[in-house]
Amino acid sequence: MKHLIDPMDLSVEELDEILTLAQDIIKDRDAYAEKCKRKKIATLFYEPSTRTRLSFESAMLELGGSVVGFSEASSSSVSKGESIEDTVRVVGCFADIIAMRHPNEGAPLLASMYSPVPIINAGDGGHNHPTQTLTDLLTIQREKGRLSDMTVGLCGDLKFGRTVHSLVKAMSRYKGIKFVFISPKELKIPDYIISEVVEPAGIPYEEVTSLEDAMPNLDMLYMTRVQRERFFNEADYVRLKDTYILDEKKLVPAKKDMVILHPLPRVNEISVNVDKDPRAAYFRQVMNGKFVRMALILKLLQIQ
Ligand code: CP
C-alpha cells in the first residue's frame, strides 16, 4: 500500500503519471465522474484549511465518492486524548483513504505506520505539503509548458513555509533548474534543504534579500505568506510580515512570460492590483489543486 507523506515518496515517473492523469481529467471530467463510486475519503484536519480540505472533498465528490471527517481536533475524540495511531485505525474502518493535516511534523508519517488505508499528508507543521507541490507542478506545467530549464524565485517565509520545502525537493529532480531564495535572514531556507536536497542535486542557487534585484532573471516567482502560526513571538512576526509586498511597480522589470504562483492564503504579500496581471496564476493554481488531487486519489486507490 502506498502513502504520500513526502514529495520524494513519488518517483519522477510517478509524478509525471499523476500530472498526465490530471490533464486528462481536465479534458474529460465526465469520464471520471463515477470512478470512485462507493469509495470514501476521510479528511482529518487538526489545523485550519480552506483550499486543501475542500479540494480533497471536491475531488472525491467529483469522482463519484463521498466524504467523512473533521475540520478541527476539538470536534473529534482527539479532544478526549485519543492517539493518532488509534484514530487512523478507527477511521480506516470507515474510509478507503485518509487526508491528514496536523501541526506536528511527522504526524502523517506516524499515522501511515498504523493505517489500514493510504494516508496523504495534507501538511505537517513547517515540514512538507506534498499535494500543494503536485498542485504547483501541474500549474507550472500548464502555464509554462515545461518543468525544466527555468530560474525559480521563492520569496517570503522560506523557513516555516512547508510548501517551499516540498516544491524545492520536487523541482530539484528536473534538469536546468536554478533557485533564487529571497527572504530576510531570519526566515531563510533551512540548512538541511540546501545540504540534503539542493547541493547533492548539483543545482545552482543564490540566497538574496532583494526581490527587486532578483526579479528580471526569474521565469517563475513563488510568493509565500509569513507563517504567523509558527512564530514563537508576535513582535518578530509583526517586524517581518510585510518584508515583501509584490505590486505592479515591482513587476515592471519582470519577464513578460514570468508566472506568479502563491499557495494561498494571501495576507499582504501580493497587492490585489496584481491579480489582473495575466502572469498571476494563483487562482488558476487553486483549480489545478482539485484536479491533481483527483488524479492522486485514483492512483493511490489503484483505480484505472
Ligand atoms: N495552500 C493551502 O494549503 O491552503 P489551506 O491552508 O487553505 O489548505
Image (tube, rainbow, N blue to C red):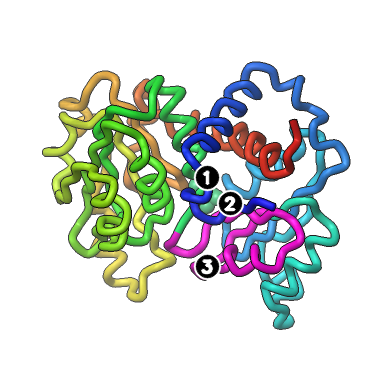
The amino acid at mark 1 is: Leu
Sequence-wise, the earlier of marks 3 and 1 is 1
Ligand 1 contact, mark 2 (Cβ < 8 Å): no
Residue on which the image places disc 1: 10
Q: Is residue 161 left or right of residue 212?
A: right
Residue at screen point 23% across, 38% down:
178
State if disc 2 and disc 1 touch (CB < 8 Å). Answer: yes
Cα separation, mark 3 vs mark 1, equals: 17 Å
Determine the image quadrant of residue 116: bottom right
Residue at screen point 60% across, 69% down:
110
Residue on which the image places disc 2: 4
Cα separation, mark 2 vs mark 3, equals: 12 Å
> Closer to the camera: disc 1 or disc 2?
1
The question of residue 120 being in magenta is answered with: yes
The amino acid at mark 2 is: Leu
Q: Secondary structure at mark 3?
A: loop
Crowd class of label 2 (few under 14; some 14 to 19; many from 20; radius 10 Å): many
> Closer to the camera: disc 3 or disc 1?
1
- Relative to 59, is 281 above or below? above
Residue 137 at what x, y percent from top left?
45, 35
Crowd class of label 1 (few under 14; some 14 to 19; many from 20; radius 10 Å): some
